[in-house]
Structures are given as structure tokens and as C-alpha cells.
Amino acid sequence: MTHNPDLTSSVIFGLGWLYLLLALLNIWWTARIMKGDPHRDKEAAGWGAYSGLLLMAALAHLTGSSSPEHFHIRMPNFIKEFIDLGAAPVPYFTLTMVLFIAVVVLRKWFVKETVGWVLLNLSVLFLALSMTDYDFRQIVGKPDNVPIVSMLFIVGFFTWLAFKRAVDNDERRAAGKPLFEQEKNEKILVWPDLVYSELICMVVVTVILTAWALLLPAPLEEPASSAQTPNPSKAPWYFLGLQEMLVYFDPWMAGVVLPSLILVGLMAIPYIDYNKLGNGYYTFNERKFAILTFMFGFLPLWVGMIILGTFLRGPNWNFFGIYEPWDAHKLEVLNNVNLSEYFWIYWLQARIPVAPSGAGELTKILFILQREWLGLLLCLFYLAVVPFLLAATIFRSFAIKMGFIRFIVFSNLLLFMASLPIKMVLRWSFSLKYLVGIPEWFFNI
Amino acid sequence: MASVGDYIRGSQIWKSIFRHPAPIDRRNRIVVMLTNFFLHLHPVSIKQQGIALSYTWCMGGITFFLFLAETVTGVLLMFYYRPTLEHAFNDILALRDVTTLGVMREMHRWGAHAMVITVWLHMYRVFLTGSYKPPREFNWVVGVLLLVLTLLLSFTGYLLPWDQLAIWAITVGSNMARATPFLGHEGPGFQLLNIGGFDLITNASDARFILLGGRFVGEMTLNRFYILHCVAIPLVVALLIAIHFWRIRKDGGISQPL
């Protein structure tokens, strides 16, 4: 195997610009603090010193690109090894869930400007240092993956902004003050205020798009060949969350039923959400359940699984750490067991019922139903009985306010959404393959 | 110079186009919104929060602008690109290497990626500000349809360069259709659709076959995706955008109860 250099001259030079940009941003931040509040001069001095360090780092990169092998600013190996060590689906999902819960619980702290700025700096530094790794660059630097990296920062920023506005409004509400959106809300003329902002916005988007197009060539691989299957074969990036679901569900669920239900569920939101509060302003406290559910679906499940599918899934859809080379021969032991096998073989110590050869169609069907009765019953229970249990317990007030049909639709959509994390946990803890496994009918759940 | 400007603005041609003086006073700022075709999409006046960037994030507007940019760059690309097995890949290669303004392909591709992201963010903002609540329930539904169509536009366009990346991404994506319940030849329940022992749903008649125009991603697929990408989906999108915008006006702005 040829050894690929972690650093090349052009990488070092490019990172120099990134450090320079970060330094300039921090100089602006320092100036902003000094201007805003004279009592924060010590803090400003700290940011100033940090900006100086970044400037030095930028200079070191821009001047030191001639001998890459002797360049010292790179991600330390022990951090790389540590991160790759924990690279597996379970730690990944645990981490995303912990992050999600932390942001929600600590939202008052999270929305502080300094906290946001520190998080931005840390993530850019992590990215910059990681770019000194060959394997990281191979996957993150793919032209089609660049938008995903920028999407991470953009989604992070807007989540921060929305929480900031929500926390502010919730505090105003608690203090009996008017909401931010109500404070300055006079009618103004569309010309010039809106028309000019639209014009500026169009110019900015055009400039960004043109610069992006000039700097980054669009990918073009070998001509199409139906004989050569690439490994891994990946769908376009925005569908990689769905492709990741294939690990846990069969295509008819992961590729057809669940995506359709996502869309139906999205369309159903305005007709399910009876809460009249929070119409036209940011808030968290007034719509906790709605916001948590939507954010859980969008952040850890949708965006989180796109990240997983794009950056962490390699050949044979195996899981790879971000600094790990994609080795097509990496072996992952898959020994997943169906619920029916657990039931008949492990628990009853019996044989799995199989229809005798030459049996009629009806007998075959009955044998299949006998084999899978437990899983079928569980699924039926989940979709038909659990809604009533929910209505009688934790969602009592929802059920009363929504009425019967609305609540049944709502609880079934919610249960389908929950089926993904449930199936994941079952897979990780019991190596469960299918709750209902009827390959004869392509009906595996 | 002022007199030249005055002469132009006083001419019959100018007046026939614009009809009213420049929007420099209150009266004409109102009039311009009512008499200009491109501006009449907007109301004359609007609540301040409806245009505050930290409130709206401008993502819906950017999405629309990107749709226009995709239309312009896409039409330019259509002048060069031929959707046949013989030419498709080489035309893209030529766009990269020799064609003047071949950078239109980059703008088109990155604009498409950006549009997917801005649609999501627009939806995120609309949700977080509760802007789907009455009276805007139906416009949210239209928005979800536009989200689906944006993804389908991007998906159908992904095939057109006809390189390895393209056909295998589409193969992986469209393989799902095989498993459609009842309508896919590897989906649950397809065996129920048979007449006298003959399956109606086979690999040459199922949902995937209809999507691809064949049993695998081939020339008919390229043709189908090209027409979906350049004609069929954009037409539907344009119609839905018109409805989406019209409803914003009729529902009393982008947000807040009436």
C-alpha cells in the first residue's frame, strides 16, 4: 500500500487562509467587545491574544508550505486514535442525542454570545486541524460533500439564533413584558425597505454562488458503466439518512413507507397542532412538545443521519472513523437474529414451524403466521393498542383536546417516528434483525 | 446630464413603460408597487417583523432566487447538453474543459445543493415561528410539496452527467422503488395483484420500471429523468410557487395571526 502524505503544500497554504479568516473574525470580535462594554477589557485582551496566536498560525501556514513533512501544526495522533476508537454507530448516536439534550436543557447558557462564539471557534479549529489528516480530507474534501460541511455550520448557527430569540421571548413573557416581535412591528412601505433588502440579498447570493462555482469544480468521475459497481454506492447526499435507515429496516420500510410517512406527517402538522400559542414569534416554553419533536426529527435523525451516511459509512456500508482509511476488507461480524428465532429456538428450545413439503397455499400461510405470531402481535399492539395507552396516560390532555381521529393520526405518526430509534436500540442490544420476518412475502419489519 | 435624464423620463416610450414618476416620495412608492408587474407580488406595506432578517432568515426568498438562478443556468446548459448515451458524458466533459462559460455547470450544481439546504432552513424557520398555524395551514402543505419537488429536481438532475457517481447514486436511490408495497416486484403484497396465477407486477412492470423506463438505469432512464428535470417538475414547481406566494398575500403575510 502506498503511503499517502497527511500534508501537502497546497493543503498547508489553503489552511493558512482559513486561519487568517478566523483571526480576522476574532479581531472583529475583540473590537466588538471593547466597543460594547469598557468593563470587559480583560476579556477583550484575552480574545486579542488569541487573535494574535491565530495570526501567527496563519503566517506559519502561509510561509511554511514548502516542506510539508516538517510542518508541525497538525492534529495530534493520540486525539485521532481516541476519536477513531469510539467510531461506531452506538457512540455516534449517543453523542448526537447527548448534544441535542444538552442544547435544549442548557439553552439559557447556550444562547450566550460568548458561548456561541467559543463553539464556533472550537468547531472551525477542529475542522482545520482535522484537514491535516489524509483520510479525513478524502471524504470531507469531496466536492459534493462541501455543502454538507457548510450546512453543519449553517444549521448550527440558525439553531443557536432560534434558541436565542426563544429564550429572550420566554423571559419577556415571564416578566410580563411585550414580546420582541411585538415591540417593533409598525407597518412600513415595501418600497424601499423590502425591495432593497431583496436586491442586496440577490447580489450577495449571486456573488457567493459565482465564487463557489469558480473555486470548486463540480465532480465528474469515470463514464458510467453498469459493469463496475463502486463500493460504497451512495445515494445523493440528501437521501443518505434514508439509506442509513436500510441498516435497520428493509427497503419497503426505509425506502418507501417511512419516507412517505415523513411527508404525510409534515403535511399533517398544522392540523394536529392545536396549540394556538407561538404563532408568529420565537418561543420554546409555549410549545415545548412541538418544538422538541420537530427538532428531534430534523437534527439528530435527519441531519445527524446524513452526516453519518456521508462521512462515516465506507465500503460495504461499514462504519469508519473520520481519520480511518476506507479499507474494503474491513470485516464487521453481522450475526443478527429474528424475533421468531429467539422465540422458537432460544426460549422454547423447539424447531421453527415449517410447512410440510407439498402443503397447500393455505397451510403455508398458517404455518408462516404461526412462526411469526409473536412479532405480528407486537406490531399490532404497537400501532393499535399503544395509542390508547398513551391517551390514557402521558398524552391525556392531548387526547382530550385533539379528539379521536386527530389523536389516532398523531399517535400513529409519532409511533412510526419512534420506530426508528426503537429498532436501533433493539439491534444494538439484542442483535435483533426482524421483529416480523416473512421473506416469503417480502414482509420484514 | 440632468436634462438628458429628464428628456428620457419625459419621453412617450418611458412613460408608456413606467407610467408614474420614480418612487422617491410616499405616493409614488405606493404606486410603484401597484403598477409594476414584478413588484405587484408584494403588498404595498408590511409589518416590520415580516422583513427583519433575524426573524425571517430570508431562506424562502433565497430558495426562490436560487430556483430562478437554476432556471437560467439550466436553460443555458440545455443548449449544450444532449441526453443520449453517446453524448451525455462527453458534453459534460466539454463543459468542464473547453466550453466558454462551462462554469454554468458548477453554478447549476452548487446552486442545486444550496437550494436543498435553504428549503430545509426555510421550513425550520417557519416551524419554529409557528407560521404554519391558522390561517396558514394549507400553505405549509404546499410548502411540503415544494420540498419534495425540490428533492426530486435535484435527484433527477443528479443522473444527467452520466458518470459513475450519477448512475450508481440513481441506481441506489431508485432500487427502493422495487420494494414499494403492492407496486414493486420485491415489495410486500405484490403477489396479491395477479390474475389467474399471472403476476401483474414483475420487474418489467413495477414502480421502478416506470421510473427508470427499463429494468436498469439506461438510455430510457436518461431520457425520462431529463424530461422530468427540465420540463415536467419545473412546471409543477412554478405553479406551486405561484400558489405559495399568492397564499402568503391572501393569508395576511408570512407570519402572525391575522
Image (cartoon, coloured by chain):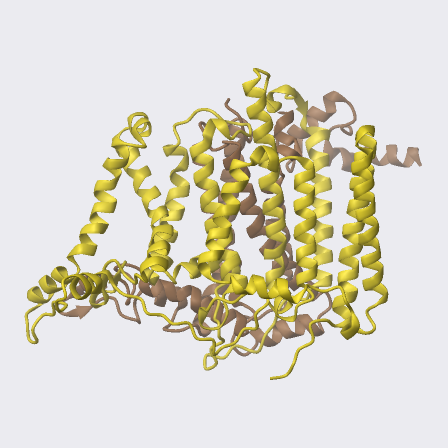
- Chain given the colour brown: B
Is residue A163 among what the camera can see?
yes
Which residue occupies the extreme bottom position in the image?
A: A1
Q: Position of residue A206 (x, y in %)?
A: 71, 50
Residue B182 lies, in percent from the top left, at: 25, 60
Q: Position of residue B186 (x, y in %)?
A: 28, 67
The tint of chain A in the picture is: yellow
Q: Residue at x 83, y 46 (%)?
A: A49
Please name the residue shown 55% across and 31% down the image: B254
**Left or right position of A38 against A313:** right
x%, y% of residue B60?
A: 58, 41
**Frontmost residue, A258 versus A28:** A28
Q: Is residue A296 left or right of residue A215?
A: left
Total number of numbered labels? 0
Residue at 68% over, 64% down = A76
Q: Nearer the viewer, residue B220 or A370?
A: A370
Residue B11 in sight from this viewpoint: no
B202 to A118, vertically: above or below: below
Q: Quadrant of residue B9?
A: top right
- Farthest residue, direction top: A176
At horizontal 66% and vertical 29% (from top left) the residue drawn is B33
Quadrant the N terminus of chain B occupies: top right
Query: In this view of the protein, which residue sits in the foreground, A34 or B110?
Result: A34
Q: Is residue A93 left or right of residue B97?
A: left
